[in-house]
Amino acid sequence: MTDFKVVMIAKSIQQAIIIGGGIGGLCTAIALRQIGIDVKVYERTKAFERVGAGLAGWANAMRALRKLGLADQVIEAGSVFGRAEIRDPSGRIFQSGDFAELERPRGEPSVAIHRAELHRILVSVLPHDILHLGTKCTGVKQDADKVTVQRADVQTDQTDCVIAADGLHSVVRQQLFPGSKLNYAGRTSWRVIAATQDQAPLTTISQTWGCGQRFGFVSVDPHHVYWFAVSNLPEGQTYPPEARKEFLIRRFQGWHQPIEHLMDVSPAETIVEALIYDIDPLTLKAPRRVPRW
Ligand SMILES: Cc1cc2nc3c(=O)[nH]c(=O)nc-3n(C[C@H](O)[C@H](O)[C@H](O)COP(=O)(O)OP(=O)(O)OC[C@H]3O[C@@H](n4cnc5c(N)ncnc54)[C@H](O)[C@@H]3O)c2cc1C
């Protein structure tokens, strides 16, 4: 977005409500405050807890975080990686590369970080009174000039603009684009932060590709490695926390180190399971405004 457009938007919109206090919602809140918009964030969870596993912020994401004034804090809290390796299950590298080419035009490194650390940094630069925790949005209604946000506690709020950052199961997206649906991608993922550094080089992001399954890992700080596993599975074939580790050890048996080591040092209850979904692109034919009252 050009600076010109930003100024035009800021002139017509003085207030905004952002639905969802995840990474997207909080980054948007910080950006809108930078151009003078009065923002409130509605987040359904009652408290931000230290949940999730790791995220890789590539150079373009770091450039966006630089604009938000947060790149140095994220680099400090995470771990810079400058090399990628792709292996087969025996450990043979079949592709590798350094990121100098990717990073040079953007002037930023790529950084892996615990999702909770990134989230903590975003929360720390926002005034607490704009974060409305325990506030669940149930829908939006628009009239000629304002948008009304409906809340699960039956209160309503009016504002100039609503930004839906309420994640995969967004109620706002479903209302605005009733035809949109989640498509199961045919695979399920498991994510963990493991307390170890053994055999995981600090500056390399690594993936191993097998038949219908993948394993990846990267350091998020000098004492922790983020690892993830992905496997083709029928939708709904999930595992309770205590069964996940055993399933994964069986599934990745015989794969090169440190894969077995990373699974060994990870308590079963820390393994986060998530089915992978995408949505079809939202078409412009869908109503851009919800019906009037
Ligand atoms: C708890 C959590 C842990 C995650 N851990 C990882 C991870 O370890 N690695 C990884 O790669 N990705 C992880 N993800 C996904 C990743 O953060 C997102 O896919 C990505 O950052 C995009 O963020 P988002 O802000 O669009 O959506 P999300 O991060 O999904 O955030 C959506 C937010 O909206 C809130 N919300 C939803 N519905 C409503 C409603 N009706 N009213 C008010 N609030 C609502 C949710 O509670 C959530 O905080 C995680 C997401 C969550 C929510």
Image: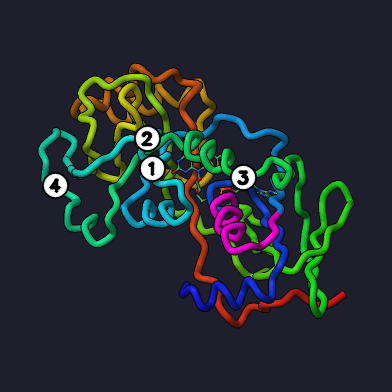
Quarter assignment of residue 54:
top left
Asked if residue 58 shows in the view, the reply is yes
Callouts 1 and 2 close, C-beta under 8 Å: yes
Query: In the structure shown, which secondary structural element does the residue marked by tag 4 occupy?
Result: strand
Mark 4 vs 2, N-terminal side: 2
* Disc 4 and disc 2 in contact, CB within 8 angstroms: no
For this view, does 29 lie left or right of residue 138? left
Which residue bears the numbered disc 2? 76
> Where residue 126 is drawn, which disc sits there?
3
Quadrant hosting residue 144: bottom right
Residue closer to the observer: 175 or 149:
149
Q: Position of residue 154 (x, y in %)?
A: 89, 51
Q: Which residues are magenta?
A: 25-39
User: On the rendered structure, is 43 left or right of 267?
Assistant: right
Give the mark, 1 or 3, whose residue is nearer the N terminus.
Answer: 1
State left or right for residue 142 relative to residue 163: right
**Residue labelled with disc 4:** 96
